[in-house]
Amino acid sequence: MAGAQALAKLVEFAVFDRAGCASAAPSPTLARVLQFRRIASVQHPASSSEIRRRLKQGRKVDEWLPRSVAAYIEEKKLYR
């Protein structure tokens, strides 16, 4: 826990909402010890789980990832 507490003093966390999920915010207990900023954004239809599932099935995810990230995943044969 000491590592998490030290990290919480050093960084500000970005909190994004996800479609179909409850509002993304730390619990009141965590909010007292974490620095966080809620980021308003257009919600993306894909989750990381969906991206990994598609990659495992050999399907394309180019429209969901930056080209450099997709290339790295392909080069390293990740999520196969």
Image (spheres, rainbow, N blue to C red):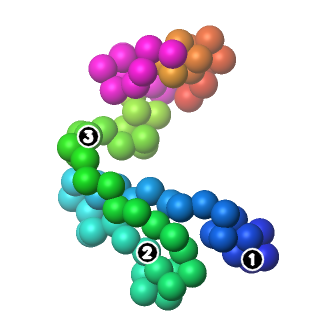
Of mark 1 and mark 2, the one earlier in the sequence is 1
Of mark 3 and mark 1, the one earlier in the sequence is 1
In this view, the residue in front, 9 or 61, is: 9
Q: Amino acid at mark 1?
A: Met
Q: Residues within 10 Å of mark 1 (few under 14, many from 20)?
A: few
Say which residue appears at 58% left-offset and 17% top-offset.
72
Where's residue 44, x and y in %?
A: 26, 40
User: Tag 3's secondary structure?
Assistant: loop
Kindly identify which numbered label has been placed on residue 47: none
In this view, the residue in front, 9 or 49, is: 9
Q: Residues within 10 Å of mark 2 (few under 14, many from 20)?
A: some
- Report which quarter residue 37 is drawn in: bottom left
Residue on which the image places disc 2: 26
CA separation in Å, label 1 and label 2? 17 Å
Where's residue 1, x and y in %?
A: 74, 77
Q: Which residues are magenta?
A: 55-68
Residue on which the image places disc 3: 44
In this view, the residue in front, 13 or 1, is: 13
Do the numbered discs 1 and 2 sit on residues whose CB atoms are within 8 Å?
no
Left/right placement of residue 43 relative to residue 49 reads left
Residue on which the image places disc 1: 1
- Report which quarter residue 38 is drawn in: bottom left
Of mark 3 and mark 2, the one earlier in the sequence is 2
